[in-house]
Image (tube, rainbow, N blue to C red):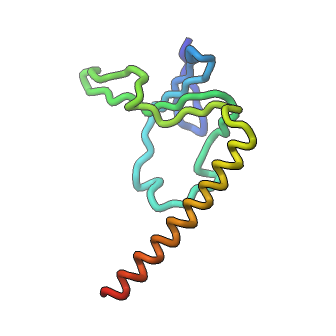
Amino acid sequence: MTDIISIGGRKWWKSLGDEGQVIYTAMFIEKDEDVLGKFVDESSYDILVDHDADFYLPAEIGVDGSGDTSLNESRLAFKFRKNVFTEEEQIAIFRELIRVTKNEIIIFRLKAFNYKILA
């Protein structure tokens, strides 16, 4: 069964997937100028996902009704599965993310430093 729901004033198709997950399909697209260059805060999201869910982008439908409306990988925004990673795996992933981020910052600073020397 598919329902149309409203979350934060935006419309979504909501259905149940074959793995028991909730499937949300957006019926809208945010304008680039409304989100680019803006920091994320509490006003940036309408719901907190705490259950298994798949989120899909809206289908690109032509004026004549033609277009691919199937839920496929090209339209998949993200999947959330609760309790897939153990606490130890989550800590390891977080530590690796911090390490990589620090390395990227160092590389960025070195590139900027080299650019200043060459300029």
Q: Nearer the viewer, residue 41 or 7?
A: 41
Name which residue lies at 55% across and 24% down: 23
Q: Quadrant of residue 20?
A: top right
Height in image: 59 above or below 47? Answer: above
Residue 5 at x, y percent in the picture: 58, 26
Specify whether 89 is left or right of 27: right
Q: Nearer the viewer, residue 66 or 16?
A: 16
Relative horizontal placement of residue 99, taking residue 31 as reference (left or right)? right
Name above or below for residue 119 compared with residue 48: below
- For the image, the number of numbered tags is 0
Residue farthest toward the top in the current orientation of the protein: 1
Q: Position of residue 98 (x, y in %)?
A: 62, 59
Q: Quadrant of residue 61?
A: top left
Left or right of residue 84, residue 102 in this image? left
Q: Residue at x 58, y 56 (%)?
A: 40
Could you tell me residue 78's position as x and y percent?
52, 36
Q: Nearer the viewer, residue 90 or 71?
A: 90
Q: Residue at x 71, y 32 (%)?
A: 83
| Residue closest to the eye, 4 or 23 | 23
- Identify the residue shown where x is 29% and y is 20%: 65
Residue pushed farthest right?
A: 87
* Picture quarter with the N terminus: top right
Q: Is residue 108 above or below residue 13?
A: below
Q: Is residue 92 above or below residue 49?
A: below
Residue 45: x %, y % from top left = 60, 45
Residue farthest toward the left in the current orientation of the protein: 64
For the C terminus, give its image quadrant: bottom left
